[in-house]
Amino acid sequence: MFIDEADYVRYLNHERQFFARALVEFGGYNAAQADREALERYPYEPANPDRGWIFHDSPWHWAMIRLHGNCFWASQPDLTQPPHDYWEDYFATMP
């Protein structure tokens, strides 16, 4: 999935950034709290065959689970997808 270690780290940091952004913008977290949560949610994993499973879903998805619990999409279907500008920024800055 990753070209090399630097590629993995870039992708990991990108996902952390957008997870934290969702917590700040939609959960009322301050930046420091959001950064701590992002590090916890997206820990660095040494190279192994299972590394990166967290990336199977978007940081938006994981942030909404953090904010609203598992199955948030059933109770808050309007949060299933992030706002357009979030996606736009996410893809524009993707490594």
Image (cartoon, rainbow, N blue to C red):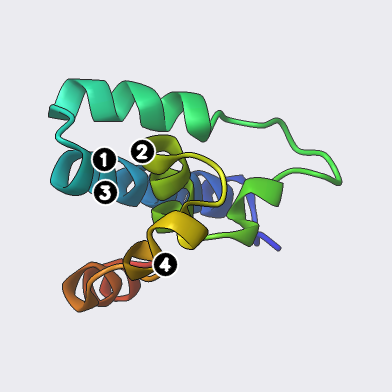
* Percent x, y of residue 36: 34, 21
Q: Between residue 8 and residue 14, name the one nearer to us.
A: 14
Q: Are marks 1 and 2 in contact (CB under 8 Å)?
A: yes
Label located before the other in sequence (3 or 4) = 3
Reading the image, the residue beneath label 2 is 67
Q: Amino acid at mark 4?
A: Thr
| Residue under numbered circle 1 | 23
Q: Position of residue 31 (x, y in %)?
A: 15, 29
CB contact under 8 Å: marks 3 and 4: no
Residue 22 is marked as: 3
Please say if 52 is above or below 39.
below
Where is residue 24 drawn, in percent x and y? Answer: 17, 39
Numbered mark located on residue 80 in the image:
4
How far separated are the C-alphas under marks 4 and 1?
15 Å
Residues tagged 4 and 1 counted as in contact (Cβ below 8 A): no
Amino acid beneath label 3: Ala
Crowdedness near tag 4: few (<14), some (14–19) or many (≥20) residues, C-alpha within 10 Å: some
Pointer 3 or 2: first along the chain: 3
